[in-house]
Image (cartoon, coloured by chain):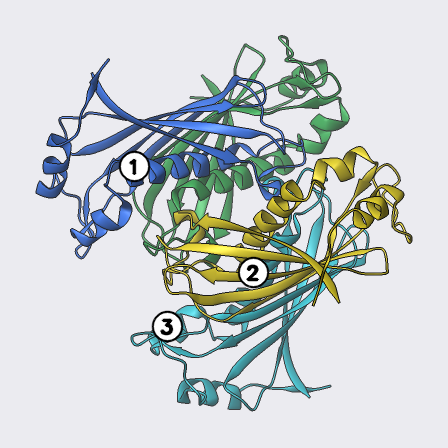
Chain colours: A yellow, B green, C cyan, D blue
Amino acid sequence: MKQITAEVTLKVRFSETDAMGVVWHGNYLKFFEDAREHFGQVHKMEYLDVYNNGFFTPIVKSEINHKAVVYYGQEVKVKARLIYCAAAKILFNYEVINLTTNEIAAIGSTMQVFMDASSRTLTLNKPDFYSKWENNQLWENV
Amino acid sequence: MKQITAEVTLKVRFSETDAMGVVWHGNYLKFFEDAREHFGQVHKMEYLDVYNNGFFTPIVKSEINHKAVVYYGQEVKVKARLIYCAAAKILFNYEVINLTTNEIAAIGSTMQVFMDASSRTLTLNKPDFYSKWENNQLWENV
Amino acid sequence: MKQITAEVTLKVRFSETDAMGVVWHGNYLKFFEDAREHFGQVHKMEYLDVYNNGFFTPIVKSEINHKAVVYYGQEVKVKARLIYCAAAKILFNYEVINLTTNEIAAIGSTMQVFMDASSRTLTLNKPDFYSKWENNQLWENV
Amino acid sequence: MKQITAEVTLKVRFSETDAMGVVWHGNYLKFFEDAREHFGQVHKMEYLDVYNNGFFTPIVKSEINHKAVVYYGQEVKVKARLIYCAAAKILFNYEVINLTTNEIAAIGSTMQVFMDASSRTLTLNKPDFYSKWENNQLWENV
């Protein structure tokens, strides 16, 4: 398995908490999104790069496993790991660390596919621009 | 002043509450949106009708005045009033009633303008399809 | 395996769409929540019943598999299935059907545990009020 | 009139856009919240400080005026200005600047009151801890 990583630090918004006083479980998908976008910035493959090449990369699967709560006022670090796939898929794993308690708050994953932006049809092979980008990355073997 | 009204009943989502145990203040704009969309359905002027006539109607101003809280598990009734404007504007007033307590939870308003969907420029006159629709409504004098 | 089901029909909010023109993937967890709450109403085991018995039931795992998109203006039906668990867990499966296209838009699941509301510690056995409720349900064998 | 200010830079989340391809109007209240929380950090008067002194400061009024759109991928700067009030109120004005276009995207305001956290009743006089804090600030005359 080989991977590329990036991590981002976030402050929890009050509006992201719920009546149990903790971050509402569904908002972790926003944290994953933030980490994915940050990854895109760091590694030069942003949503708009994908779009300008004629593609969307919709999420077809997502999963969250909650390990500990995050309260309002706490900061989290979200680590995104892109896992290399031979198929035309983009697989990220995530780790959300509560920086106040040093606990892992959640782990999760998302799977994206390539869709032609104009026809909105699935692309079965990796687009060239993406394969080229993959080849230029320094993958870490794990 | 003349108006047309419609009202909708909503159940508060758990994800709409915050750490104070009540509906997060910003979510009232979603309640207003629900009431506006319901109004569109009832009076046959939906977002997609507007869009199919070549227009967007972005919100340029919104205001919320909170009078009482809404707790999770409570139902609200949202009343939308379209106020007739001579200018090319869509003005709604809203009233959010907590059906559990019979209190007014909030009042508010939104202002929309007409924007040409392809050029994304402001339209200074009411589009014909909209004027025609206005003429066919039974306005209530208040 | 035995199950109890309930289903609810929802209209997609404009604010739930994203720049691809479809429902943002994370908002399906709100649809799941709506279905779960509706299930609670129908089968008389609501969030507040749980809370009044001294418990929270936080979500510890959630999963969404997207099969087709849902556009603004479309209605969805969300079917929630409570799957009987011997352990002190609440497992729901969900199916989101796009009523405009009759396609399955997504399937998914959530897992909840029982937490003592005052001590915020995990409860390893099913609380009595919940076992009693389970015994009174008409489970469907599948 | 006298004021204290703070400003924060934010990246727009994909999930914050809508089907018009721009930030959904209601999400500006989240930007205001971010600016308010950042203000609290900078000037040492955070939500949790208020809470630990026995108070909530719920928002009783908010207003947004939209001047220009913000697209996904653009950064915004949000400037929060606390305006001094003799009454027991917290009044913020906001300015959202689209850093990509240098346009003002929106201006707005929020009004908060002091509520006793345990009794959930309104406090008509400024709490002591807050008056003390006000006295220690360097207000700018405008």
Vertical comparison of A105 with D42: above or below:
below
Q: Say whether marks 3 and 2 touch (CB < 8 Å).
A: no
The residue indicated by pointer 2 is C34
What amino acid is at disc 2?
Asp
| Residue where numbered disc 1 is placed | D42
Q: What amino acid is found at the position of numbered circle 3 in the picture?
A: Tyr
Residue located at (79% from left, 54% from top): C68
* Chain assignment, label 2: C
Q: Are marks 1 and 3 on the same chain?
A: no
- How crowded pointer 2 is (Cα within 10 Å; few <14, some 14-19, many 20+) is rated as many
Residue D132 locus on image (x, y percent): 10, 37
Front residue of B99/C16: it is C16
Q: Chain of mark 3?
A: C
Mark 3, Cα crowd under 10 Å, few <14 / some 14-19 / many 20+, is some
Q: Are marks 1 and 2 on the same chain?
A: no
Which residue is identified by label 3? C51
Residue C130 shows up from this direction: yes
Specify few, some or many for label 1: CA neighbours under 10 Å numbering under 14, 14-19, or 20 or more: few
Count of all numbered marks drawn on residues in the image: 3
Question: How far apart in space, not on screen, are marks 1 and 2 (Cα)?
Answer: 39 Å
Q: Please state which amino acid type lies under the numbered disc 1.
A: Val
Looking at the picture, how far across and down is residue B33, in whole percent? Answer: 54, 38
Extreme residue toward the right, this view: A125
